[in-house]
Amino acid sequence: MINKYLFALLFIVLPYLVPAQQQRLGNMDDFIAKQVVDYQMPGLAIGIIHNHKVLFKKGYGTTSLPNGNPVDTQTVFPISSCTKAFTAMALAILVEENKLNWDDKVIQYLPDFKLSDPWITKELTIVDLLSHRSGLATFDGDLLWYGTSYTRKEIAEKIRHAPIRNDFRTEMGYQNVMYLVAGLVVEAISGKTWESFVNEKIFVPLSMRYLYASGRDTLIVIFNDPFVPPGAVIFERGTDKKVKSFKLNIDSQDFLFGDLDFRSVFSPL
C-alpha cells in the first residue's frame, strides 16, 4: 500500500519538478551570458551532465575579441594540466593489460633516465611520477619546455640537472616534467607515440571526435585565435597579484578539447 501511495505521489510531483529544473537552467543561462559581457570574456562552452544525461549544453561569445567565430559545443579549448588525467589513464590501461605495475621502477622502462640524486633515480616508481612526490619542487624544470624547442626526450634528459629540493615521497611538488616522463614510459612500453596510444585506446573507443593531442604545428593550425583579450589581466582571488595574460606556443602535449567531447565521455556508445 505504501508503494502505491509513493508511486502516486511521484506521479503528481514529477511534472512540477521538470519545469523547476528548466527554470533553474534558464536562470543559469542568463547569468552566464551576462558574465561573458560584464567580464569581457571572448567566449566559453558549458556542458552539464547528470546520471549520464546531458541537461544543458551551450556556447557563449566568440573565439576571440573583438571579432571571432561563435563558440559552440564543438569549439576546441586547450585543457592544459587536465591532460595529466589522460596520461594516467594511459598508464592504467597498460597496468590492466599486464604490461606495467604501478610500483615498477621508472628506470626499468627508461634506463637512461636520471635525477640529480642517484638513490632517488634508482627508487623512483610510476606512482611517484604521478603523485608529485619525486623530490623536485613545484614547477621545477618547467623552463625546459616553456617556449623552447627541446624534444620530450631532451627535456627528460636535462631534468637530471635540477636540484632535489623536497623530501622524496614526503613533500609534494607539483610537476609537469614528471608527467612528460610518464608519457615517455607509455611510449617505451607500447612502442607507439603518446599521441597515437591515447588516440587508439581512449579517444576512438569513447568516440571523442573533436579532441586533438597536438604539438606545435597542429596548435598553430587549429588554435590560432587568442581566446583572451589582448592585454588582459588575470586576478588571483584572495591576493593582490596581477598576472598579464600571454600566449604560449609550445610542444607540451596540450589537448584541444571540445565540450561535445567532454559530454561524449558520459554518453552511451
Image (spheres, rainbow, N blue to C red):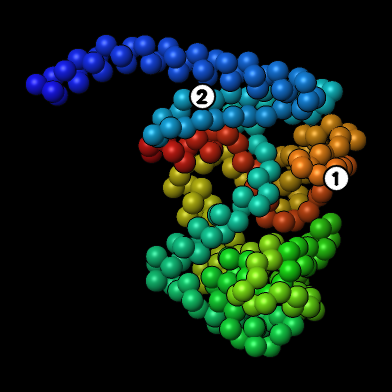
Locate residue 144: give its quadrant: bottom right
Q: Amino acid at mark 2?
A: Phe
Kindly tell me whether residue 83 is visible in this rendering.
yes
Q: Indicate the secondary structure of the residue bearing disc 2.
A: strand
Residue 131, horizontal then vertical, whole percent: 58, 66
Residue under pointer 2: 56
Residue occupying the point 78% across, 78% down: 163
Q: Nearer the viewer, mark 1 or mark 2?
A: 1
Seen in the image, is 19 located left or right of residue 78?
Answer: left
Mark 1 neighbour density, 10 Å: few (under 14) some (14–19) many (20 or more): few
Return the residue found at the far bottom.
Answer: 118
Q: For the residues labelled 1 and 2, say whether their Cβ atoms are less than 8 Å apart.
A: no
Locate residue 151: give its quadrant: bottom right
Q: Amino acid at mark 1?
A: Lys
- Name above or below for residue 22 compared with residue 244: above
Q: CA distance from mark 1 to mark 2?
A: 34 Å
- Name above or below for residue 151 compared with residue 204: below
Along the line of sight, the residue nearer the viewer: 125 or 226: 125
Which quadrant is home to the N terminus? top left
Name the N-terminal-most of marks 1 and 2.
2
Which quadrant is home to the C terminus? top left
Q: Indicate the secondary structure of the residue bearing disc 1.
A: loop
Residue under pointer 1: 241
Residue 34, horizontal then vertical, whole percent: 70, 18
Mark 2 neighbour density, 10 Å: few (under 14) some (14–19) many (20 or more): some
Residue occupying the point 90% across, 35% down: 231
Return the residue found at the far left.
Answer: 1
Along the line of sight, the residue nearer the viewer: 62 or 31: 31
